[in-house]
């Protein structure tokens, strides 16, 4: 399905997701863990937006808050013209079929007490779609779509391999004909040989069903293969977002450059990238409960002294503006 940049399916505006830190017998609030700290981006209809970053940078919190699984602290989430943060109760339940999620660990996300038929059919039962016979026929269609035998309907999750379990999870996510799916590291728990099968399945379904994905991963090679645009997160903020080709050929933010320099390049097609110098970042990621005052990356940035000398800006004190530096290429760095 071709991407139309004029058709925005989802807009995230100034999203914040803070988790309270409590102390003592009465759980007095003493601070916040800033998992997602004021991020904004759009997802166009028919595209796959990848989000990458280190563990704990806020990728999963972003995806789950978009689906209202985690309540946002602030911000807007506009999906098909409606602000999900202002929709509650029955009205939210009616719109939920339009967006679904594929979880990281397929076995943990499937009820071990239910058969495959019961698991995949559950969304149809909850939303009271058609009758029992039609629901079972729909389950057969879904299993066929994800490459599973109809005979597996009466089996239980533990009887399947990890890749097959993930296919069951994908079938369940597709049951209600969603237009948008959050894929939260859907292949990270699978063997490398199985990962490609699941990724290819997701891409085939995207084309045949006209789906839109938010693909969360820490594997830059996987994200490069499947995504149309890529957003890079660091300590709760998006530091750069651009078209896949543009980001890999012309990264701007120092953190993006460091990430991309660490990718193994086995394919001779990318021989020019093999020549890139490995950038080793010093120090550790600051705590999300106490992020730096200025730029979140200032404690590890190899360009900080150059910015201070040439731009006269103290990265420790001044937060950079997140802005568009070229067509659909956004970054937050004082270098630009």
Image (tube, rainbow, N blue to C red):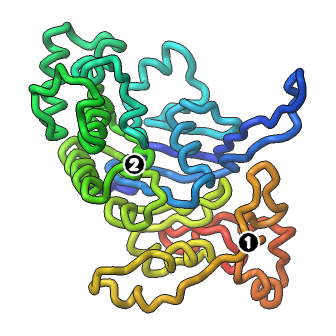
The location of residue 304, given as percent across then percent down, is 76, 81
The location of residue 179, given as percent across then percent down, is 33, 37
Please tell me whether residue 214 is drawn above or below residue 107 in the rendered image.
below
What is the spatial separation of the Cα atoms under label 1 and label 2, in whole angstroms? 28 Å
In the image, is 241 to the left or to the right of 214? right
Identify the residue at image location x=31%, y=34%. Answer: 169
Identify the residue at image location x=43%, y=81%. Answer: 249
Among the two numbered marks 1 and 2 on one chain, the one whose residue lies closer to the N terminus: 2
Please give the residue where the numbered disc 2 appears in the rendered image: 189
Number of residues whose C-alpha sits closer than 10 Å to that of mark 2, classed few (under 14), some (14–19) or many (20 or more): some
Please give the residue where the numbered disc 1 appears in the rendered image: 283
Identify the residue at image location x=62%, y=65%. Answer: 239
The location of residue 232, given as percent across then percent down, is 54, 63
Q: Residue furthest top?
A: 131
Residue 233, can we see it? yes
Identify the residue at image location x=54%, y=85%. Answer: 278
The reply to whether discs 1 and 2 touch (Cβ–Cβ < 8 Å) is no
Depth order, front residue of 180/165: 165
In the image, is 153 to the left or to the right of 28? left
Depth order, front residue of 218/127: 218
Residue 1, can we see it? no
Please tell me whether residue 292 is drawn above or below residue 256 in the rendered image.
above
In the image, is 221 to the left or to the right of 306? left
Number of residues whose C-alpha sits closer than 10 Å to that of mark 1, classed few (under 14), some (14–19) or many (20 or more): few
Q: Residue furthest front?
A: 159
């Amino acid at each position: 399905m071709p991407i139309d940049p004029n058709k925005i399916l989802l807009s995230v505006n100034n999203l914040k997701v803070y988790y309270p830190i409590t102390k003592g017998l009465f759980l007095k609030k003493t601070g916040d863990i800033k998992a997602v700290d004021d991020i904004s981006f759009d997802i166009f209809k028919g595209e796959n937006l990848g989000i990458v970053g280190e563990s704990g940078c806020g990728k999963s919190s972003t995806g789950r808050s978009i689906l209202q699984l985690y309540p946002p602290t602030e911000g807007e989430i506009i999906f098909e013209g409606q602000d999900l943060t202002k929709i509650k109760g029955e009205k939210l339940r009616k719109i939920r079929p339009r967006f679904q999620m594929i979880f990281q660990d397929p076995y943990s996300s499937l009820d071990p007490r239910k058969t495959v038929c019961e698991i995949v059919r559950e969304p149809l039962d909850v939303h009271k779609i058609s009758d029992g016979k039609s629901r079972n026929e729909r389950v057969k269609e879904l299993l066929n779509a994800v490459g599973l035998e109809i005979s597996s309907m009466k089996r239980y999750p533990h009887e399947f391999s990890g890749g097959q379990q993930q296919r069951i999870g994908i079938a369940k996510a597709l049951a209600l004909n969603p237009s948008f799916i959050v894929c939260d590291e859907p292949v990270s728990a699978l063997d490398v040989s199985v990962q490609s099968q699941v990724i290819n399945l997701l891409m085939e379904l995207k084309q045949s069903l006209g789906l839109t994905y938010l693909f969360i991963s820490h594997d830059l090679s996987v994200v490069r293969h499947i995504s149309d645009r890529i957003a890079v997160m660091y300590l709760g903020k998006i530091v750069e977002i651009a078209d896949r080709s543009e980001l890999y050929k012309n990264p701007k933010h120092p953190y993006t450059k460091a990430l991309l320099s660490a990718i193994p390049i086995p394919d001779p097609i990318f021989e020019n990238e093999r020549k890139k110098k490995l950038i080793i970042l010093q120090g550790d990621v600051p705590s999300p409960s106490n992020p730096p005052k200025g730029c979140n990356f200032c404690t590890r940035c190899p360009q900080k002294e150059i910015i201070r000398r040439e731009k006269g800006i103290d990265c420790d004190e001044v937060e950079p503006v997140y802005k568009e530096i070229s067509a659909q290429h956004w970054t937050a760095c004082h270098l630009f």
